[in-house]
Amino acid sequence: MTTRVLVADDQVLIRTGLIALFGAAPGIEVVGEAENGARAVELAAATRPEVIVMDIRMPVLDGIAATQQILAAPTEPPPRILVLTTFDLDEYVYRALGAGAAGFLLKETPPDRIVAAVHAVAAGDVLITPSITHRLVETYSLHHKVNAVDRTVLSALTARETEVLRLVANGLSNAQIAQRLVLSESTVKTHVKNLMGKLGLSSRAQAVVAAYESGLVVPGSTVSNSGSTR
C-alpha cells in the first residue's frame, strides 16, 4: 500500500531533499509540495494526502496554524501531520501537539528514520519519544501555567485508562504499554481510544499534553523498569 505524502517547508533545500528522499523510498508517493502554511492547507484539500510533513516556521501561515486549519476541515479520515522542528523553540512543538499533530521530528533526523516515521504515523502510530517529549513538554510546563485540562476531568477515566494515559505521556508505545501491563496490544489500543473519547481529544499527542496539563504526569518524572513513576 502506498502512502500519499505532502511536504510543506519554506526552505527549498530541505523541501526538495525530503521530496527526493520520499521519492526513492518504497511505499511513499509525494503528491505535492508547499512553500508556506497557506499553500499546505490548499494542497491538503486538493490532494488528500495520508501524511503531511509540516515545517513550523513558514511565511504567510505557520505550521501550527496550518495544522489547526487542516485538521478542522471535514475530511475523513483526516491526514496525519508530522511536524518538523529545529528544536530552538520548545513552545512551538508543544502547541503543535496540542493542535493535533501526530508527532514531530528534528530536522537533523537521519533519512531512514524520517522515512520510518512517515510509515509509522500513516499506520496510526504517534512519533513521540521519551527523550524529546519530556524535554519539550516539561520545559514548557516548568515555565508556563496551563489550565486547559483540569485534574477533575480525569475522574471520568477508569483506573486502567488513567494508568494507560500516564504511560502514553511517558512516551511508551502501545506494544511497550501492553508488555508493561500484561495486556494485549489490541486491548491497549482500545483503552487509548476510550480515554481520548472521554477527554474529548483527537490525537494521542494531545493525550500527552493533557496528562501534563492535568498534573497526572509531573515534570521530571519518569517510568522505571518496574512501571513505577519516580
Image: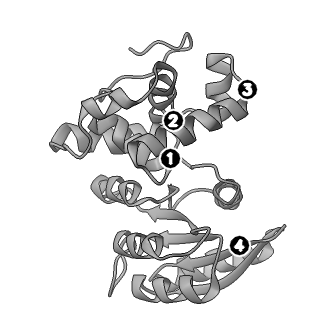
Identify the residue at image location x=35%, y=41%. Answer: 210
Callout 3: helix, strand or loop?
A: loop
Indicate the quadrant containing the C terminus: top left, top right, bottom left or bottom right. top left
**Of marks 2 and 3, which one's residue comes earlier in the chain?**
2
Q: How far apart are marks 1 and 2 (CA)?
A: 11 Å
Q: Is mark 1 on a helix, strand or loop?
A: helix
Mark 4: amino acid: Leu
Per the image, the residue denoted by label 3 is 184
Q: Position of residue 213 (x, y in %)?
A: 27, 39
Cα separation between marks 2 and 4: 27 Å
Q: Which of marks 1 and 4 is in front?
A: 1
Q: Is mark 2 on a helix, strand or loop?
A: loop
Q: Estimate how packed mark 1 is, as few (under 14), some (14 to 19) or many (20 or more) residues with alpha carbons within 10 Å.
A: many
The residue that appears at 34% across and 30% down in the rendered structure is 154
**Badges 3 and 4: C-beta atoms under 8 Å apart?**
no
Mark carried by residue 171: 2
Indicate which disc residue 21 carries: 4
Mark sitting on residue 204: 1
* Res 207 quadrant in image: top left
Mark closest to the chain's N terminus, 2 or 4: 4
In the image, what residue occupies the spot 23% across and 36% down? 150
User: How far across and down, in percent of the image, does residue 220 sit?
Assistant: 32, 26
Work out whether mark 1 precedes mark 4 in sequence or the reverse, and give the earlier one.
Answer: 4
